[in-house]
């Protein structure tokens, strides 16, 4: 049996759909009944067979910080996909980020070792891939530095260290480092905010860019890696390196909106950072513009996907196709 953590998130829900369609016996953690409805919604984007596929999943109410529930979840498990994580770029959330991302991952690794799990796939982020100071692209071997790094990436790097510890204790592991994952359904977080922003028809776009990949490709690569003899390796998962102007323009066109044409200046971003800080003090909402955010926009990185393409002979889905598919669903849900 396969265990999936973070099964109610973007990656986890799509992974569960693929595993159940492949007739794989699967168990998944969940924290509330409301989260399960999200999974059903995601399934419904791709199939009319939602109920029967959903009912194939052995759902366990639990949390990666709750050892007793994890011990129950790990009974008779041969493979683990660790997708669960807390995402925030607000420095004030660092302790929570570290607890969930590092300590939670340590719990998963420890139980994998204790129960003789055959293989673990850990979902990390390109935020743990080192940035180059030249025009060279970043690879899995580029040295990582904590300097100018957001708190989420720092704690995901610490989580990777826990996974590598497991590898030293003879646990078979693979780590994937996806870029911005494009996919439907989670419009209030992650790449979903690109669609929400583009739908408003703003004229401005931020500087910089990132690596992008369709959620389906992330899932295919994870499953392929787990079914090969590959172990103790990490892989950058990026289909294309795009500027934010390029990706927002693609999404805007797919939504029938005008493309942004005015670049945000760095001084405007600093004003936005101040306004964001004031908003947090008044409303308590998480900060989204910080010093590390602005530094990343000023110094974008290009990522090399050659390693995974060569290892799996993998061909990526076009970003345009994924944008069009997600935009269609966004329009249907926001008409």
Image (cartoon, helix red, strand yellow):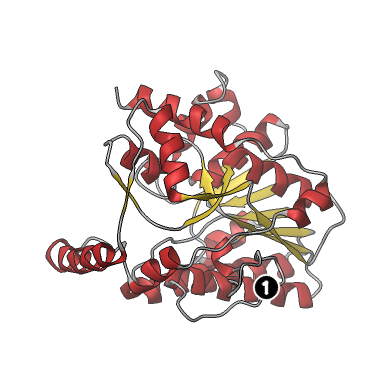
Residue 57: name its quadrant: top right
Rendered location of residue 96, percent (x, y): 39, 71
**Residue located farthest toward the right when viewing the structure as drawn:** 229
Quadrant of the frame with the C terminus: top left
Q: Can residue 57 be seen in this view?
A: no
Q: Tag 1: Cα neighbours inside 10 Å, few (<14), some, or many (≥20)?
A: few
Left or right of 65: which side holds 305? right
Which x, y percent locates residue 43?
53, 29
At a point 79% along the width and 64% down the height, the residue shown is 172
Q: In this view, does 6 lie above or below 147?
A: above
**Up-down relation of residue 153 to residue 204 (above or below):** below
The residue closer to the viewer here, 244 or 113, is 244
Q: Could you say whether the residue bearing mark 1 is in a helix, strand or loop?
A: loop
Tell me residue 171's x, y (percent): 78, 68
Q: Is 192 displayed left or right of 232 in the figure?
A: left
Q: Would you say 253 lies left or right of 215 here? A: left
Total number of numbered discs in the rendering = 1
Q: Which of 189 and 171 is in front in this view?
A: 189
Mark 1 highlights which residue?
A: 142
Look at 12% across and 64% down and name the residue there.
Answer: 282
Q: Is residue 268 above or below residue 317?
A: below
């Amino acid at each position: 049996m396969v265990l999936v953590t973070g099964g109610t998130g973007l990656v986890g829900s799509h992974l569960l759909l693929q595993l159940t369609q492949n007739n794989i016996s699967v168990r998944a953690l969940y924290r509330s009944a409301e989260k399960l409805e999200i999974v059903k919604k995601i399934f419904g984007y791709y199939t009319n067979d939602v109920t029967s596929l959903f009912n194939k999943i052995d759902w366990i109410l639990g949390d990666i910080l709750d050892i007793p529930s994890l011990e129950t979840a790990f009974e008779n498990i041969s493979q683990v996909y660790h997708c669960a994580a807390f995402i925030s770029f607000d420095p004030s959330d660092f302790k929570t980020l570290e607890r969930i991302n590092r300590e939670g991952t340590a719990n998963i690794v420890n139980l994998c070792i204790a129960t003789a799990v055959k293989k673990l796939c850990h979902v990390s982020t390109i935020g743990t891939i080192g940035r180059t100071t030249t025009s060279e692209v970043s690879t899995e071997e580029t040295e990582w530095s904590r300097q100018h790094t957001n708190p989420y990436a720092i704690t995901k790097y610490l989580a990777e260290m826990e996974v590598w510890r497991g590898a030293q204790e003879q646990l078979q592991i693979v780590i994937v480092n996806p870029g911005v994952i494009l996919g439907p359904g989670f419009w209030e977080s992650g790449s979903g905010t690109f669609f929400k922003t583009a739908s408003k028809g703003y004229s401005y776009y931020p500087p910089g860019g990132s690596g992008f990949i369709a959620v389906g490709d992330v899932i295919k690569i994870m499953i392929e890696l787990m079914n090969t003899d590959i172990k103790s390796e990490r892989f950058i998962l990026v289909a294309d390196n795009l500027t934010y102007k390029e990706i927002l323009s693609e999404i805007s066109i797919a939504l029938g909106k005008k493309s942004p044409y005015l670049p945000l200046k760095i001084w405007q971003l600093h004003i936005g950072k101040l306004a964001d800080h004031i908003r947090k003090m008044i409303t308590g909402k998480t900060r989204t513009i910080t010093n590390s955010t602005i530094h990343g926009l000023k110094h974008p990185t290009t990522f090399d996907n050659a390693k995974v393409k060569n290892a799996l002979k993998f061909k990526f889905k076009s970003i345009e196709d994924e944008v069009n598919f997600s935009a269609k669903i966004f329009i249907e849900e926001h008409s």
